[in-house]
Image: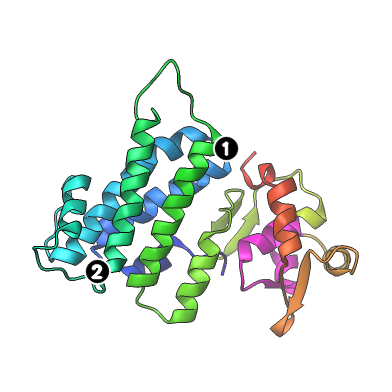
Amino acid sequence: MGLIEKRTLLSQLAPPLHAFLTTQLIDEFVSLERRFIQRDWGPAELDGGQFCEVLARILYHQDSGNINLTKDMSECADYVENNNVPHGIQPRSIALHLVKVIRTVYKFRSQRGGIHISPTYAPNHMDARFIIEGVRWAMNETLRVFWNGDRETVARAIRELLQFDVPCVGLFEDVILVQRTDLSSNDELLVLLHYAGEVGFTTDELVTHSGFSKRSVERSVATLVAADCRQIVRVAGGRYRLTDLGSRYIREHLADKLLLQ
């Protein structure tokens, strides 16, 4: 399998979370991540507020026991912060920290001009980065608190959500395909291993998914694992995964190549 998928997140979060709101939350998160990777700063600043609205409704539902699919973000947050009403989320600090973060993100994007068209403001990397990091923290904290699965799986989900999405890698039933034709064999294997996350791929799986000959894959693997490169490492079961050096190479040199042509 590749990086944690949407259906996996949904199945492990709903229940206890409301299925429709959880689907909205995941969709907003994935959309924000993908556009941020593509250096499209505007959506992070505009759509970050939608993520906050959905998460506020989720917190209101869990804290009050009432479901409201359209309740205003501020009203939801006000309930969570109200000391004079009953609260389902315990300890209280969990919900209060989440509300503080989403209030900050929501207010920041509005006051910086991202919510309106302005002749004096243009979306920029720094503002978008601030918003996306707040959204990432809130999403990861939501996973930590409400995940139904085992702790190691949620820990892996959190770690993998901090990685880049890989738009250029498509999953067609059981076929994984790198949908670019301008990558070297070394770079294509790195992209595939980035997609594979912590699970990694064996040499045979890399041959299958890349379409390269086994000899070509073995040559690339030998180069990438060598002492003067060390961008991948062989782990249990004969599988290969990215090292920190490999991840840095992806971020610094292949970010554009993760996109569809």
Mark 2 or mark 1, which is nearer to you?
2
Question: Which label number is shown at residue 92?
Answer: 2
Q: Secondary structure at mark 1?
A: loop
Residue 113, position in %: x, y? 38, 27
Q: Residue furthest top?
A: 119
Residue at the spot 24% in from the left edge and 59% down from the top edge: 58
Magenta stretch, overall SS: helix
Query: In front here: 142 or 2?
Result: 142
Relative to 58, does residue 227 appear above or below in the rendering?
Answer: below
Residue 77, position in %: x, y? 21, 52
Q: Secondary structure at mark 2?
A: helix
Q: Are marks 2 and 1 in contact (CB under 8 Å)?
A: no
Q: Which residue is mark 1?
A: 39
Start-end of magenta stretch:
188-211
Residue at the spot 72% in from the left edge and 56% down from the top edge: 248
Q: Residue furthest bottom?
A: 237
Report the quarter where the N terminus lies. bottom right
